[in-house]
Image: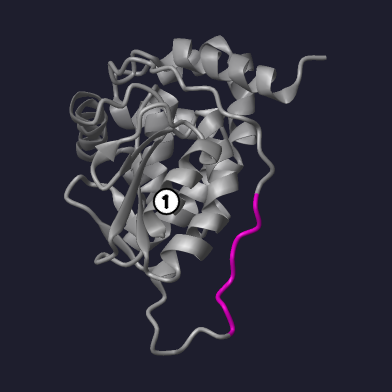
Amino acid sequence: MPNMRNRLTALIAAGVLAVAMIMGIPASQARPAPRVTPAAHPTASPAQSAKTPNWNATVTRTPDEGYMLGNPDAPLHLVAYLSYTCPHCADFEAEADAQLRLGMIAPGKGTYEIRPFLRNGLDLAAALLAECGATSKFFGNTQALLAGQRTWMAPVGALTEAQKGRWESPDFGTKMRAIASDLHLYDLMERRGYTRAEMDRCLSDKARADRLAKRTAAATEKDFINGTPGFLINGVTLTGTYSWEVLKPQIDARLR
């Protein structure tokens, strides 16, 4: 029996073929990363002073339309370009989240910015849902989408002809809602507190979709990001860095 990684890779490949033309976005190839064990989500320290800002709850939008967690005045700024259909991005999120929050963000030493990177139409539907609602919800939405990636990607390999037809609808909102419905993304986001009407509005937001596509193009052209995950520290693209194992020492060296 093929392992889960091979099954998920095959499902994603099928999804890319099915929806690659949805927004005219080329499917970039994710870089290899080791399989990791999900880390526990950190909790606030009992010793934290009431006067100390809770940087793990401080989320702001950036000029590059990313979502930044942490102290805006921190000396270290980490940017991660993530794809919601990339298994290696799910690996990174599972291993890095708790360590970034505890060691870098909580003490105000650094910020962590996520910029969604679109590889295919499934990424677009997921990104529209991740950005749905208040800015403060983005990191929780992203974590839920990446943690549940195997589950909501599972139907991709068994799409019916009728489903494929809906995914190719000329109407943008119809197309995005069909993807969300067939992949049970509505169910996932309802558990996050969203209503169907809220999600439908976000999935039909063509202007936001166009901004997401432009952001991806800018990442490739300006930051030389051609696959996911991709990283920058203080505006410098990190070459040869596609996993938490390789990224962590580079962060530690700058925090000393």
Whether residue 195 appears in this view of the structure is: no
Q: Position of residue 126 (x, y in %)?
A: 43, 37
Provide residue 94's location: percent of width, then percent of height.
Answer: 59, 45
Quickly name the residue at label 1: 253
Residue 26, quarter of the rendered image: top left
Helix, strand or loop for the magenta stretch, by majority: loop
- Eyeballing the image, is 228 above or below 165? below
Residue under the point 67% across and 23% down:
5
Residue drawn at the location 46% of the way across and 31% of the way down:
242
Q: Is residue 174 above or below residue 80?
A: above
| Residue 219 in the figure: left or right of residue 57 | left
Residue 1 is a magenta residue: no
86 relative to 115 in the view: left or right: right
Amino acid beneath label 1: Ala
> Which sits in the foreground, 16 or 115?
115
- Of residues 203 and 127, the one drawn nearer to the viewer in this rendering: 127
Which quadrant of the figure contains the C terminus?
A: bottom left
| The N terminus sits in image quarter | top right
